[in-house]
Image (cartoon, rainbow, N blue to C red):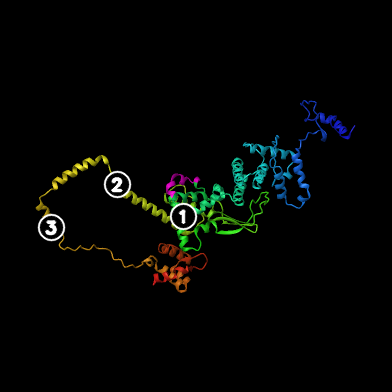
Amino acid sequence: MSDASEILKHVLSDDKLRSSKLFQDMVFTDQPILRRGSQISRPETPPEIREMRSIAYTPEAYLKTSAWLFYTQGKFMENFSDVYDFSDDFVRYYPTYRDLTTEQLRGFFSWRTRIRSGETPPAPQPFIYMLAYEIINGIGVDEPVDGFHMLMKLRHDYGANDNAVKRYLSQWLTDYAVYYSIDPALIGDSPDIEFDRFLLTLINWEDCSDEDLWEAIFRLSSFPIAKSGFYESHKTLFRKTACRVFRRLSDFFRTKRKHSLVEKYFGQLSADNCRLFESAVFYDSRQIRSADYTINSIHSYWCVNGQWFCEMFRGSRGRNKNLGDLIRTVDSILRERSGSSHKTKPGDTTRNVITIVNKVIDEIIEEKRLSNARRVDIDTSKLSSIRRSADSTRDKLLVDDAEDSAAEELALPDSAEDTPSESSPVDGSDNSCELLSEPETAFLRALLSGGDWKAAARNAGSLPSLLADSINEKLFDKFGDTVIDCSSDVPELIPDYSDELNELIR
């Protein structure tokens, strides 16, 4: 008797094992409880899989990369189909044919067969990635555009409930379009390309409608606008205020700052080298040495001597915190100005932004007041009675020609020349300095002349920072900007406004 049979007999005749809970209340058939390794049935290995595995042991494979091996094995199994019931779930990073067991390989090829026939069967995550690897390597793809649509379908079918799959497939779709020169219009629904579209709207704020501008703000703001109770109750006012604030602030940065508002919030357009199909098993079978591919005016790729480069906005590519703080501030100030009982804190922004938001709200309130004042309601049902009254009045006013002439003479002025109307004198003088108090004027004069501004503040019984804030606020309407920089301990005049300030206090 073999050793294996002795071990099985000894284990099954153990009294302690028989009396254990594992064997109580159980009915056994003639199937053995324990089996030898030779008795365990194994799935049959198709000859194609055996031959595919042997590729990894050829002399050529030892000198090549794992990406080359995947591409070569994939091309060998390109038209293979199988029928095998596999329902296990497993995890594998960067899965390849070489890493999978026979059961897993048969499960993958059976699942791929069903996918190619139009089905959408469930699959473990490694199967989805392996099929994506095959497509981006051109395995089982007749034309590049066909592979693009296959990736699109794979993302649609298996990325809806898996954010990781959706994120990777979206990026590989863009890379696929670049590598195979697919029409850029086909990748318009990619999250990365949608971001570019909304960012272009913010960049071209002067040429877009409020509807388009609001959509871009809504999609790129980190502030959850849809969850704001005030926004849900005052959508028209909120949208109008937010769009006007963004336009006003963009114009301010264009005229007063070196970089635009979009560059401040999202970074600047820059070029850097890149790797296509990052995080995928990809073999560069086409050996591209030179290429040029433009998606839009702020996103393009090119290849020089086999090295790929990409130009795009490399700051925050998604929901933006800076834009979110701006919209949070709009939400907070609108709540406060409307008397809402649910107050919120403004976002992390500057005093200048708060001033602009308040000015915009003032403008909208005034526009609404004037619109209500000009409104004229006409009751058309009363038009007939008004006409009858007018006819009666006309008949009463009819007079002889002589009387008309006399009335006309009485109505003429003594002189043929028109009497000039009185108007308030306009001398073109600027009274902005009258807005400042004497201590503020003395403090500003000391800064302009390089005098003792600390003494001027002490004489005023105030702090330099308080005086500077007060001057900035009072002169904001004239300059549209702060004239004194208080970011450090020493207040400094903005050099661009020195000449105007000297004229102002002269």
- The disc at residue 409 is 3
For the point 31% across and 68% down, the residue is 427
Q: Is residue 324 visible?
A: no
Q: Nearer the viewer, mark 3 or mark 2?
A: 3
- Which of disc 2 and disc 3 is earlier in sequence? 2
Can you tell which quarter of the image residue 123 is in? Answer: top right
Identify the magenta region.
Answer: 226-239
Q: Which residue is mark 2?
A: 376
Looking at the image, which is closer to me, 209 or 12? Answer: 209
Could you give the CA–CA distance between mark 3 and mark 1, rounded to whole angstroms?
Answer: 61 Å
Could you give the CA–CA distance between mark 3 and mark 2, rounded to whole angstroms?
Answer: 37 Å
Can you tell which quarter of the image residue 248 is in? Answer: bottom left
Q: Quadrant of the C terminus?
A: bottom left
Query: What is the magenta segment's predominant secondary structure?
Result: helix
Q: Tag count in the figure?
A: 3
Q: Which residue is mark 1?
A: 205
Q: Amino acid at mark 1?
A: Trp
Number of other residues with Cα within 10 Å of mark 3, as a class: few under 14, some 14 to 19, many 20 or more: few
| Side (left or right) of 506 relative to 182 | left
| Side (left or right) of 406 relative to 450 | left
Check if residue 235 falls in the magenta segment: yes
Q: Nearer the viewer, mark 2 or mark 1?
A: 1
